[in-house]
Image (spheres, rainbow, N blue to C red):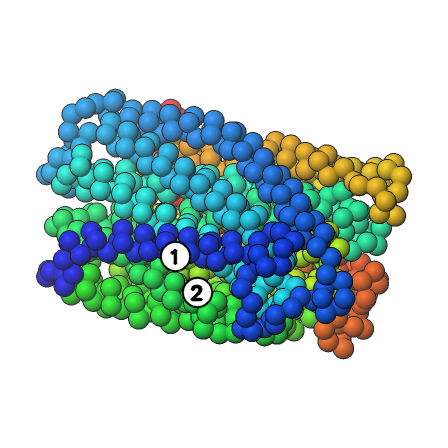
Amino acid sequence: MGSTLMSDLATEILIPLCAVVGIVFSLVQWLLVSRVKLTPDRTASAPSSKKNGYNDYLIEEEDGINDHSVVAKCAEIQNAISEGATSFLFTEYQYVGVFMVAFAILIFLFLGSVESFSTESQPCTYNQHKTCKPALATAIFSTISFLLGAVTSVVSGFLGMKIATYANARTTLEARKGVGKAFITAFRSGAVMGFLLAANGLLVLYIVINLFKLYYGDDWEGLFEAITGYGLGGSSMALFGRVGGGIYTKAADVGADLVGKVERNIPEDDPRNPAVIADNVGDNVGDIAGMGSDLFGSYAESSCAALVVASISSFGINHEFTAMCYPLLISSVGIIVCLITTLFATDFFEIKAVKEIEPALKKQLIISTVLMTAAIAVVSWIALPSSFTIYNFGSQKVVKNWQLFLCVGVGLWAGLIIGFVTEYYTSNAYSPVQDVADSCRTGAATNVIFGLALGYKSVIIPIFAIAVSIFVSFSFAAMYGIAMAALGMLSTIATGLAIDAYGPISDNAGGIAEMAGMSHRIRERTDALDAAGNTTAAIGKGFAIGSAALVSLALFGAFVSRAGISTVDVLSPKVFIGLIVGAMLPYWFSAMTMKSVGSAALKMVEEVRRQFNTIPGLMEGTAKPDYATCVKISTDASIKEMIPPGALVMLTPLIVGTFFGVETLSGILAGSLVSGVQIAISASNTGGAWDNAKKYIEAGASEHARTLGPKGSDPHKAAVIGDTIGDPLKDTSGPSLNILIKLMAVESLVFAPFFATHGGLLFKIF
């Protein structure tokens, strides 16, 4: 069909080189953040400059305060948050580690039993005239790749949490010099996480492929089938990270808000509130560690789905290494594009005012998308033959390299559209959130009604964007095109994660400013950073959900091919039963996670009330609250409550595939994908809108907002109730649903050989 302009040697050098550049860049960003010292010594602070909206003095000096004890207090609060987050993650990882080992054994036993643990070579699945490595090899290498994916996911989440807890107080201290300097510190810290995760995920996957190739040799079909375990490992850890972290953070947040803000009328993050440390810990374990593992899982799965389909196309059949590595090359140049994009936020443009924060973050999305489009065009030109074939349900479809460029491009631009639609519906700069805030005039009930309506409406455009992506990419390159569209959406993952991680870091910075007793002007700056962060967090969730839909469909297609299903007939009773049950699963999962948050929050509310009622001088500020008990309540609740939802997701494909067969399982996957995406988008956007409606009233930046405030007014209390209802929607159930649809699909693909051989026991019996 033709050769590639880029040599195999150049590919072997470029992929690890880009990954190493990403790691080095993240370390440079970390060193720049570390120059902000958590000491009262002013000379130890970052060098003075008149760039990025701050001058050579602190707000405290301007106000005649300059109290050095404030800096020591910030350091003390940061240590408490960091210790709480580290302690929780270690506890969570102990439980997850047991699951990881047990599930790895299960993978080995199920896949090994396909050919009765035979060590004999077998006919290839897609070409019976060739021989492939034994099923036992697939079992062993799938287990190894699962463990590697799980460990990489855990490490990604943990590193993200450590970086965020390292940066939160430093962002607070930089806010004394100006909003621009605080923004740069928070954004650089987010970039550390973004680049570390993107580069580590790419590097580990590339190394695993090359190591497995030593055994598999020319059997690329078997090699990349074994690699799918990498995506399964990444997503299974992400599920527990998202659910466990989400329950932790929202139990503390809801408990703190209901007693502190509604009952006691004290500010958010007031140090008198016993749940504030647990709340700030939760931001890091849920929104940072969980979110990092989640997006790593999406990246690993989309790469694995593309590689599996490519291995049985002309790339794999003809052993074209450069063309085979096309998905990895896209991710590699994505790191370089994101590196250049990051410099626009930290070095090329200045931020001098609060109103410039959100536009600066939006520019990151636009710049990275435009630059990435050009990069994809170049990679498609040099790394692909002008014409090639792609496997398409039993036949080979002829595809041109420009058609594959359009597949990746449509996914990339669909991601940008989803991001901007999410911003429109969750930012308080636009009418939808302002309408929700206005509805608080008549109480919490109308606020809830308006918020739900907004969430449902916000689903429309993202679904059309996903639908267009699916149609274009499938028309051009079948299931490989859909996998590449998903990878296109995730190609700027480093920038997406930097923007996403910026939000919780800014949120923590505001909490530390309040707890350390810093001036109102500093709190205004951190609140502005936080409000922009809320919107960017919602954009990040939109990206994650959109990419999850495409990844799941690509994995679904790979599963159908691997399981030997020629067509999925929805009129068949077996398939339709699966379809309707699969559509129900996201509701069941959401019910479990939301009830878990409610139960944990109930205990938290009772504990916070008990402390306010029984500790003399707590309300007056003369006594210290018992933070540790609240941290323990969140930890115990989240560890206990994350197991049932996790079991539902992990066991469903195993039970359905084993007892009902691959046709019913295909219905389950299709149903959960279709309903899960809708619920995830509406839940995330509803929660984000309620949160920013509350912040709109609190900030009082416009005449309309001032008529609804101030804090403590009836409209504000109604807004707090809406925000509290939205917390588990946007930070627990919504984000976890995209892992549900991805994880069930990749798990089905990994176990497809077993289900195809031994599945459908009930139908065989009757």
Q: Residues within 10 Å of mark 1 (few under 14, many from 20)?
A: some
Say which of marks 2 and 1 sits in front. 1
Q: Nearer the viewer, residue 543 or 334?
A: 334
Residue 162, given in percent of the width and then of the height, sits at 52, 45
* Quadrant of res 723: bottom right
The quarter of the picture where the C terminus appears is top left
Q: Which residue is mark 1?
A: 25
Q: Which residue is mark 2?
A: 342
The quarter of the picture where the N terminus appears is bottom left
| Residue type indicated by callout 1 | Phe
* Quadrant of res 763: top left
Q: Establish if 56 lies above or below 96.
A: below
Q: Establish if 463 lies above or below 582.
A: below
Relative placement, left or right, of 431 versus 313 is: right
Q: Residue at image x 52%, y 61%? A: 187
Relative placement, left or right, of 677 versus 387 is: right
Q: Residue at image x 52%, y 56%? A: 35
C-alpha gap between disc 2 and disc 1: 10 Å
Residue 250, given in percent of the width and then of the height, sits at 66, 46
Q: Are marks 2 and 1 in contact (CB under 8 Å)?
A: yes
Identify the element where label 2 is drawn: helix
Q: Residue at image x 67%, y 57%? A: 510
Q: Residue at image x 52%, y 38%? A: 240
Residue 302, given in percent of the width and then of the height, sits at 35, 51
Q: Establish if 649 lies above or below 77.
A: above
User: Does residue 502 appear in the picture of this structure?
Assistant: no
Relative placement, left or right, of 676 versus 328 is: right
| Residue type indicated by callout 2 | Thr
